[in-house]
Image: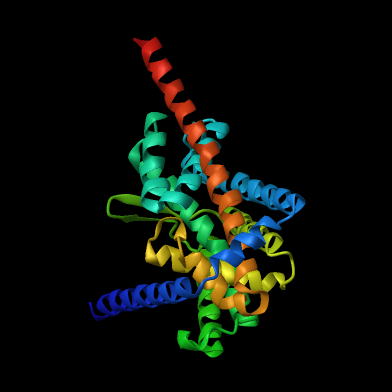
Amino acid sequence: MRWARARRWLGIAFVVAVGALVANVARSMDWGAAWHALQRVEPATLALAAALAAASHALYATYDLIGRHLTGHGLAAPRVAAVGFISYAFNLNLGALVGGFALRYKLYGKLGLAPGVVTRVLGYSLLTNWLGYFVLGGTVLLLRPPALPPDWELGRSALRLLGGALLLAAAGYVSLCAFARRRSWRLRGHELVLPPLGIALLQLAMSATNWALIAGVCHVLLGRTLPYPDVLTALLLAAVAGVVTHLPAGLGVIEAVFVALLGARLGQGPVLAALLAYRAVYYLAPLALATALYFALEARGRHKAAAAH
């Protein structure tokens, strides 16, 4: 009980701290310089960033195929990938409750999957996503902790401890998949089944590659003038800050973290310009495509329902 209460207050304190950071950085942001810097982004740079973004979205769309394999449901792989892509694009822009959860249940339900199966598919996808995050985040924090702004009050020793904890958590999951004798549990009526070691390693490889691709988009748009590990670190910290604050699309949070960590070396204008371009190629363009695909699936479903009657 005490740990649960302490964890709740720690979460509240983190949200307040991130909110204060966002407000402080937003007041000092030079949006005029950002607009001028954005106008100077080369078309070739945007094209490369868009290609990396497309590769990332295509890879994430296959996460649900792991759940398809482990649950044994019979939906065709292209349909599963379509649901994964649509859900991810809406998740990025509208939040996890809308895209990651509600939309998945709705789309899979219309395709005939029972809620329990959808829950397991969703669970495996979440595990896949965060397993790679733990490995990459743990590695960069342990080996190359960033120099945080003084008002963050978190030293490099604490970051190294956090990095070690993330790596231990990832290693614990992989070890369970490899050596645990008991392979399933029931939690609130849902069965949790450990995948075999090969699947766990595949989850790790897919997720780590995806996070690396996302950081690659940011690195390209930042002009490749900063070391890639520094950009990766900023992205990983911004991602978890965005999740904790529950702001749709991490609005303001991503910008605040990137400016705080990289703005002094590159300038606020170029950093903000890169992030505006990043939102365009990684958030908005996929959302437009996902919206069109969603309505196409809806129309196809209505046509089949009418034909059946």
Residue 34 pos. (x, y %): 60, 64
Is 216 placed above or below 265 here? Answer: above
Left or right: residue 105 versus residue 256 is left
Residue depicted at x 60% and y 81%:
146
Depth order, front residue of 42/78: 42
Residue 266 percent coordinates (x, y): 67, 74
User: In the depicted view, which residue is nearer to us: 155 or 137?
Assistant: 155
User: Observer-nearest residue: 102 or 206?
Assistant: 102
Query: Is residue 78 among the parts visible in the rendering?
Result: yes
In the figure, residue 107 lies in which quadrant?
Answer: top left
How many marks overall? 0
Which part of the image, by quadrant, shows the N terminus?
Answer: bottom left
Outermost residue, left side: 1
Quadrant where the C terminus sits is top left
Colour scheme shown = rainbow
Q: Relative to residue 45, is residue 255 depicted above or below?
A: below
Identify which residue is drawn at 57% across, 44% down: 285
Q: Looking at the picture, how far across and down is residue 6, in whole percent?
A: 29, 80
Specify whether residue 215 is in view.
no
Q: Is residue 58 left or right of 102 when viewed as pictured?
A: right
Residue in the foreground of this view, choosing between 44 and 67: 44
Say whether residue 153 is left or right of residue 197: left
Which residue is painted at 56% across and 73% down in the image?
A: 259
Question: Which residue extends farthest right?
Answer: 44
Residue at image coords 70%, 69%: 228
